[in-house]
Image (cartoon, rainbow, N blue to C red):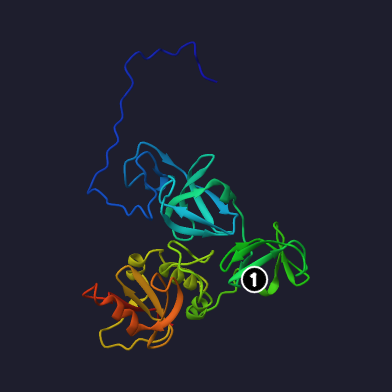
Amino acid sequence: MKDTDTATADTSPPERHSFRLNGRSVVLDRRVHAVRADLADLSLSGVIFSAHYARAVEMTCVLAGAMVLETDRPGARAATQLLRGESFHALDVTTEWAWGFCGHDGYVGYVRREALDARETPTHQITALSAPVFETADIKSRIIDYWPIGAQFPGVAEDGFIACAEGHVHARHAAPLGALGGDWVAAAERHIGQPYVWGGRGYDGIDCSGLVQTALSRCGISVPRDTDLQRESIGQPLAEGDTLRRGDFVFFPGHVGIMADEAHLLHANGHWMATVIEPLADVIARLEPTYAQPVLARRRIAT
């Protein structure tokens, strides 16, 4: 018990504390470091100074897909995309928006609040390019939604279906979360014909680095979101005289593709506005009038 009778009041002014960061200033890539003018991720408190820090709250994307935007203003450009069941670590939440970073790659942006709900623990992943969610365990029942390949959800096997909170996914359209393949070319080929959408990762469209990221993720390999970051981190660079082979990655200015074989590139691209396989020589020829060095890097993951 505190002794108030003998306590002596301290009338001296309170001690003032200052905050100081020592060493070189740090330039952070704000694509993958959650920093705003008014707020920063608490994990960065020893790296940068911010007026306020916040501890991230993990949430789950509950829509089939949701764009992660660069700002919360009308007409904001897409940065990336969350798929059903993927996590988002929210640092600032309003009635309309959540600002934070994606759980699978740390990419920062704004997501519509309606797309997020409490944290889930998924058990299954969609393997079809687009899987219908049926109202009951019957392929003739009403279709509630369509979930894209890579979407995750908690469910229980039931009469040839996976029962979940929203309905029923056919067992041929999903697999247990741990059932990973090892062929990222085959995984990427599932997207052939899908429209090219900037920032897309498979929900109604996909872009070049999204194709690479999601194809590798289905083989248990995590890589960054954007082409420049992928160019520095995927596998090892090929020597000048090495012949390309199936599964290699070729990087161009602002673009990336996967070799389907030694001569053909599989890529989501804005020229065809789709995911296609075409001769690598044709891609290089299109770029040569604009770029002195059409191919920036060639990389291979050892298998």
Residue 200 can be seen, yes or no: yes
Instruction: Name the quadrant containing residue 31.
Output: bottom left
Quadrant containing the N terminus is top right
Q: Nearer the viewer, residue 192 or 235?
A: 192
Q: Is residue 20 left or right of residue 42?
A: left
Q: Position of residue 301 (x, y in %)?
A: 40, 79
In the image, residue 128 lies at what x, y percent? 61, 73
Residue 46: x and y in percent read: 34, 45
Q: Is residue 204 above or below residue 264?
A: above
Depth check, front residue: 179 or 81: 81
> Position of 10 compared to 200: left or right?
left
Residue at horizontal 60%, vertical 63%?
Answer: 152
The residue to which callout 1 is attached is 174
Count of numbered marks: 1
Kind of residue sitting beneath label 1: Ala
Mark 1 secondary-structure assignment: strand
